[in-house]
Amino acid sequence: MKISKAAIALAAALTAGTFAAPVLAQNYPTGPITLVNPYAAGGPADVLARTIIEPMAADLGQQIVLLNKAGGATAIAASTVATAQKDGYTLLLANASSHIVTPLLAKVNYDGIKDFAFICMIASVNNVLVVRQGLAAKSVPELVELAKKDPGKLTYASVGNGSQPHLASELFQQMTGAKLNHVPYRGAAPATVDMLAGQIDLGILNMPPLLEHIKSGSLRALGVASIKRAAQLPDVPSLDELGLKGFNVVTWYGIAAPAGTPQAIVDRLAAAFQKSVNAPDIKAKLAAQGVETFYLGPKDFMAYLSDDAKRMSDLIKSANIKAE
């Protein structure tokens, strides 16, 4: 049987494609890696990313560049990575907003789950329920009682519709029967300023920027919005132990790549991130800023993401949360 030149060329091309991915993964990385941060420079995510990637450059033998692409409620950064080459050189600092909340509330050009390969989870930041200094509530039961006396009178701050503080506060209302008045802000800083000034009654906000105000007594911490207590606030009970069983709304961070990235590259990156986040000096440095580092590999990360997506989706629907 005579084989045409075209058939031989096609077979050669298919064979080359078959071996291209393993060879690419075996030599990875051979150039700089870009980690895209969906938030502005100088914020908690930026600090986390810079701290984590610093020792990884030496481990991988290549520079890791942090690219801050804020905007679109994290959609700009997520879209950038979802549509990037599937070669492990463009990664996303992933979180619930980029993969769950924003795709549910807004029209985006990517699927928050299907368009990504999830490498690992690396850290979380606790949210803490705080009230202004003059509010007549020194505990969660007292706060709930106060809110029920005059439904809708007490105001709570968030950092925007669909944000973790917003979702946490909606969950708090559902679980306690309290009715609060939502006041969205464009960031934690202005929300904290107004709470310190007595213009906002309470909020379930990221812990790091609140720590100094809690320790000084300017704000009163009533509960941590997770299953266990925060190391930085050992005397503040978790909402779970206060009777709100299963209350767990934390701001988590992970690493994702475009879907279709070779598994060998995913595994190589996962190992490098694991080594970095488990380093005692990295853990201590970030813990001092209210960030808890830990490691979940690809399978465990995907399982956590699946559970979190269901919880957040159910909450958004039941609370009738809409995009701004």
Image (cartoon, rainbow, N blue to C red):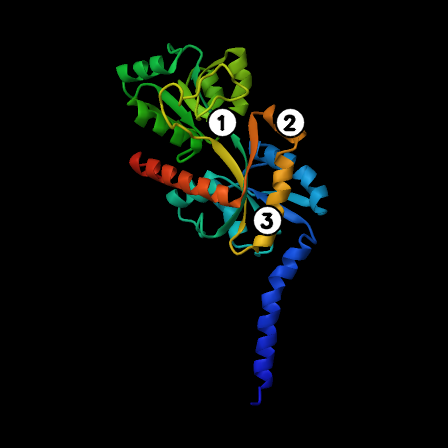
Amino acid identity at mark 2 = Lys
- Which is nearer the eye, 241 or 70? 241
Q: Residue at x 27, y 14 (%)?
A: 149
Quarter holding residue 157: top left
What quarter of the picture does the N terminus occupy? bottom right
Reading the image, the residue beneath label 3 is: 267
Which callout, 3 or 2, points to the residue nearer the camera?
3
Amino acid identity at mark 1 = Asn
- Which is nearer the eye, 283 or 257? 283
Residue farthest along the bottom direction in this orientation? 1
Reading the image, the residue beneath label 2 is: 285
- Which is nearer the eye, 234 or 250? 234
**Considering the numbered disc 2 on the image, is that residue within a helix, a strand or a loop?**
helix
- What x and y, as percent, mark residue 311? 37, 37
**Mark before the other along the chain sequence, 3 or 1:** 1
For residue 126, the mark is: 1
